[in-house]
Amino acid sequence: LETLLAVDAAYSDLAVAAADGKGKVSIASMTMVQDLKPEVGSGGATLWSGPAAFAFGGLSVLDDKNKELVRIGGVTAEAAYTRVDLTKVSALQKLSEQAAAKGVAPTSGELLPKLQGMFGGITGALRLSNLSVVNPEDGTTVTLGQFAFRSGLADLDQALSTVSLGFEARDFAMTPSPAPAAFTPRTMEMKLSVTKLPNAALWKAFGELAKAAEAEETPPKKGAKPAKAPAGPAPSDLAMQQAMAAMGEAGTELRIDALNLDTPATAGTATGALR
């Protein structure tokens, strides 16, 4: 079994307890779904796109005295895959298995061609609600009403791509509080993105950097004279210079899409872009 195209599973009342009955982890419900559908790529290859999700609710962790240390109301992880080439995924899996059997890491020349063009994009989101953690030693309690983290890669199989990430948290509390209540954040939000990334130039730079790193780690042969340092910039420096030049030509932007902080005493927000 190498790939799963469709999954639909649901479980309830899961529990793992210590053999002596001291300590227990329980989950009230857990679900997993995935549904990838085929589409024809530009080169005639069959590509796959679709959503996937994993969720559980009612997690509780008890210590050896049956006191609750951790409680989570719910966690949801979602992902959406775009134009995934399962042939390359399988080839990467086989390469990893072969490398593990040999006890050596795959070279950049073996690895990067299989990674390039593996998928067009992927987005993910993780949401957590009603977290409560208790330190059994001093009784310190930390609670968090909601937390969300999002990230994404888009158009990796096109000329220009976009990378994004962000998080949001609200209703944070700590007892006893290490800071005055007036300055304890009620909500925090940050969303960043990098747009117009030149894919071909960056893949080339990754390859050159990987080759340079491998060359530095390769021990010299016995009796061989030390190689002379090449004239001009080092290969890794040259690769970085070329990548930066390509990003400048493409108009790559680092964007602050949202930056918000709210406390009872202060509040602030910011947005902007840097080329």
Image (tube, rainbow, N blue to C red):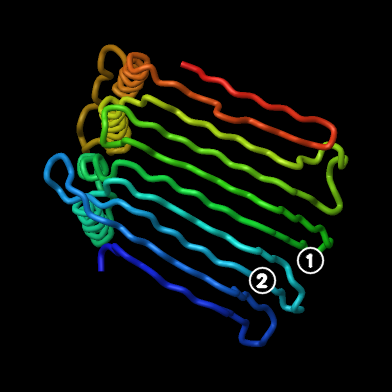
Left/right placement of residue 89 relative to residue 50 reads left
Q: Residue 240, position in %: x, y?
A: 35, 22
Left/right placement of residue 61 relative to residue 31 reads right
Report if the CB atoms under discs 2 and 1 are less than 8 Å apart: no
Q: Residue 151, position in %: x, y?
A: 47, 42
Q: Could you say which disc has been placed on residue 136 in the image?
A: 1
Q: Earlier in the sequence, mark 2 or mark 1?
A: 2
Q: Secondary structure at mark 2?
A: strand
Quadrant containing the N terminus in the rendered view:
bottom left
Residue 192, placed above or below residue 228: below
Q: Secondary structure at mark 1?
A: loop
- The amino acid type, in three-letter code, at marker 2 is Ser
Residue 209, placed above or below residue 178: above
Residue at the far left: name it. Answer: 44
Rounded to the nearest whole Å, what is the CA distance between mark 2 and mark 1? 15 Å
Q: Which residue is mark 2?
A: 60
Left/right placement of residue 64 relative to residue 8 reads right
Seen from the viewer's position, the closer of residues 185 and 6 is 6
Q: Residue at x 30, y 51 (%)?
A: 49
- The amino acid type, in three-letter code, at marker 1 is Pro
Residue 237, placed above or below residue 174: above
Q: Could you say which disc has been placed on residue 210 in the image?
A: none
